[in-house]
Amino acid sequence: MKTIFRVSKFSSDPKIYTYASSFVRALNDLGCDVEMFNCKQNFLPLGHKDHDHLTSKFKFVNNVLVNRCLIKTIRETKPDIIFFVKAENVSYKTIYKIKK
């Protein structure tokens, strides 16, 4: 069974439809083991603000944290395939490190 690592924006409520969650459901139906990583998660201790509602300075800091956490998580899970959808805050340097 292939392990697919999905990097996208996911809702914390599974009842809320997101573009990314439709891919996860389809891949699960095909028998794939899908791990999810929310690249728009707020890692800063600023309450429950969504990444999209942070100021530009806080977004920059949060994106650094997102990229570090993504690299760490991928090293731990060692997926067969990594699938990015609307993950524009993942830097090219992070993708390069993941490829290595």
Image (tube, rainbow, N blue to C red):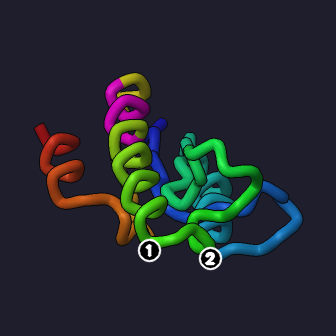
Q: Earlier in the sequence, mark 1 or mark 2?
A: 2
- Extent of the magenta region: 70-75
Q: In this view, does 100 lie to the left or right of 47?
A: left
- Mark 2 and mark 1 in contact (Cβ < 8 Å)? yes
Quadrant of res 30: bottom right
Picture quarter with the C terminus: top left
Residue that appears at 75% across and 50% down: 47
Q: In this view, does 13 lie to the left or right of 5?
A: right
Q: With respect to residue 87, does 3 lie above or below?
A: above
Residue that appears at 41% across and 64% down: 57
Look at discs 1 and 2 and give the one toward the viewer.
Answer: 1
Residue that carries the numbered disc 1 in the rendered image: 86
Q: Which amino acid does label 1 sit on?
A: Lys
Residue that carries the numbered disc 2 in the rendered image: 19
Nearer to me, 13 or 22: 13
> How busy is the neighbourhood of tag 2: few (under 14 within 10 Å), some, or many (20 plus)?
few
- Residue at disc 2, secondary structure: helix
- Residue at disc 1, secondary structure: loop
Residue that appears at 67% across and 50% down: 46
